Amino acid sequence: MQTNPAQKSLAWRFIHHLHTIDSHRFQVMKNCFACGLYDQGLTHDLSKYSPSEFWVSVKYFQGDKSPYMKEKQIKGYSLGWLHHKGRNRHHWEYWYDMIDGRWQPIRMPYNYVVEMVCDRVAACKVYQKEKYTDASPLAYYLSRNDQKYMHPETAKALEEALTMIQNKGEKATFAALKKRIKEHYTY
């Protein structure tokens, strides 16, 4: 019988959470580099090491999903997530603003859409471990229904890239995304 990670010691959760975010950042960095996004690969998710994100994530660490989900389940919101999405442009939630008196999504710049693809692939690999397949990022995206809230062009670009990963694999997809970025692709 496995022990619930929430019942583990603070030191255990600290070490395992640190390993999780380090593994995730390394995977995103590799993906971003394959797409030609060197600066974004190096700086991806650095806010996860800030006290407002790190310690709450240690507290709610589970190992198989984001600690923010557990915090939301318990409190109804996550201060760590609110901090994170407000500082990381690769999250579609960052791209919301009050325009003409109503909150609405803004189309994300393409380089951040590509970083979001890299992030989703890495997150699925880190959390799903050996169960990961090239279909995992698209399946996760579709299960969350995020596209309802994104700018339609952002949702389309993200879904196209995740579908390409499912059908053609990471190497071919990242090469195609790199080419689009070099051509100053706009969607």
Image: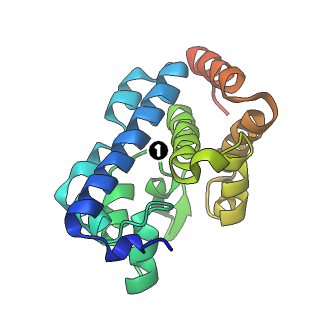
Residue at the image position 52 percent from the left and 48 percent from the top: 123
Left or right of residue 83: residue 97: right
Q: Residues within 10 Å of mark 1 (few under 14, many from 20)?
A: many
Q: Nearer the viewer, residue 158 or 25?
A: 25
Using the rendered image of the protein, determine whether residue 19 is visible from the camera's viewpoint: yes
| Vertical arrangement, residue 124 with respect to residue 142, above or below | above
Q: Nearer the viewer, residue 80 or 13?
A: 13
Judging by the rendered image, the residue that carries numbered circle 1 is 90
Query: Residue 118: where, in percent of width, then height?
Result: 54, 37
Residue at the image position 32 percent from the left and 51 percent from the top: 87
Quadrant in the picture for residue 159? top right
Left or right of residue 115: residue 23: left
Q: Amino acid at mark 1?
A: His
| Vertical arrangement, residue 181 with respect to residue 104, above or below | above
Q: Nearer the viewer, residue 99 or 6?
A: 6
If the image is split into quadrants, where does the C terminus sit?
Answer: top right
Using the rendered image of the protein, determine whether residue 153 is visible from the camera's viewpoint: no
Query: Residue 71: where, in percent of width, then height?
Result: 38, 76
Query: Residue 19: where, in percent of width, then height?
Result: 33, 46
Query: Residue 75: where, in percent of width, then height?
Result: 37, 85
| Vertical arrangement, residue 56 with respect to residue 24, above or below | below
Q: Residue furthest left?
A: 51
Q: Nearer the viewer, residue 26 or 72?
A: 26
Residue at the image position 71 percent from the left and 21 percent from the top: 172
Q: Secondary structure at mark 1?
A: loop
**How many labels were placed on the picture?**
1
| Vertical arrangement, residue 170 with respect to residue 131, above or below | above
